[in-house]
Image (spheres, rainbow, N blue to C red):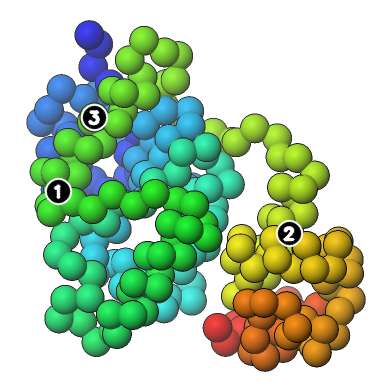
Amino acid sequence: MSMPKVIVDFRERRCGVFKALTDSDVEVEVESLDVGDYVLSDRACIERKSTNDFVSSMVDRDRNIFEQLTELRDNYECPILLLEGEDPQAGRDIHINSVRGAISSITIDYRVPIIRTRDSIETAEYIKTIARREQDGTTRTPNPHSKKPRKSLSEIQRYVASSIPMVGPKTAETLLNEFGSVRKIFTADKDELMEVDGVGQKTAEKIIKILNEEYTDKQNKIDR
C-alpha cells in the first residue's frame, strides 16, 4: 500500500501536527492554501482549529469561523472542521451556550462535520486515516484548487441568499420558500422580512442596510 499524500498549508508548519505527519508514513507537501489547512483528496479538506482559536474565531470579524467554513464547503464536497484540545468553553470568558450554539450551527446549518481530538498526535492520526481512506484504490489525489461540481440553480439561489451576514443556509432556504425568489427577498421591507421564521429585527435591518446603503470603497465594517 502506497503512502497517502497530504497537502499542508505553510502556516501549519510550526504546529505539532506537521511534525507528527512528517514523522509518520505520510507524504507531506507544503503549499500556500487559500482554503483549509489540510487537503486529503480532490474532495476532502480539513480546517483545523485549536479550541483557543475556535473561540476567538467565533467573534473575529476579519476571519470568522463561519466565513471560513462557507469557503471550505463551497470548494470541497467533504469539508471537515477539526477541533483540537480541551473543551472549547473551559476557562474562557464565553458562555457555554454560545459555544454549543456555534457547534450546533456548524453541524446542522452549515452541514460541516466536526472531529474532536485531544492533541496534535491524535489530529495527525485522523488526517492520515482519512487521507488513506480517500486515496486507497482511487484516483482521489489531493487537489489544493478543488472545486465542487457545478451548482444547480436552486443551490446558487441558496448561496446568494445565505451570503448576507447573519443569514445562514437554513434561514436562506426559509426566505426563499417564503418569498419565492432572490429578487423578492431583496425587495421585501423590514416588516415582511421579520414575518419569516428565524429573521429578527436586527437581521432584517442588516439586510435592508446592505441592499440600500450607498456603496463606498472604504472598508467599513458592519456590526454583527
How far across and down, in percent of the image, does residue 117 sit? 18, 51
The answer to which quarter of the image holds residue 91 is: bottom left
Crowding near the residue tagged with mark 3, few <14, some 14–19, many ≥20 C-alpha atoms within 10 Å: few
Q: Residue at the location (67% across, 77% down)? A: 197
Tell me, for residue 129, which label it has, or none.
Answer: 3
* Whether residue 134 is visible: yes
Do the CB atoms of the residues marked 3 and 2 lie less than 8 Å apart? no
Residue 66 vs 131, above or below: the answer is below
Q: Nearer the viewer, residue 20 or 179?
A: 179
Q: Residue at the location (52% across, 37% down)? A: 77
Crowding near the residue tagged with mark 1, few <14, some 14–19, many ≥20 C-alpha atoms within 10 Å: some
Judge from the rendering whether residue 185 lies leftward or rightward of residue 205; answer left or right: right
Q: Residue at the location (58% across, 47% down)? A: 74
Badge 3 element: helix
Label 2 sits on residue:
160
Tell me, for residue 120, which label it has, or none.
Answer: 1
User: Which kind of residue does numbered mark 3 sit on?
Assistant: Thr
State which quarter of the image contains the C terminus.
bottom right
User: Which kind of residue does numbered mark 2 sit on?
Assistant: Val
Q: Earlier in the sequence, mark 3 or mark 2?
A: 3
Judge from the rendering whether residue 95 lies leftward or rightward of residue 164; answer left or right: left
Badge 2 element: helix
Q: Earlier in the sequence, mark 1 or mark 2?
A: 1
User: Which kind of residue does numbered mark 1 sit on?
Assistant: Ser
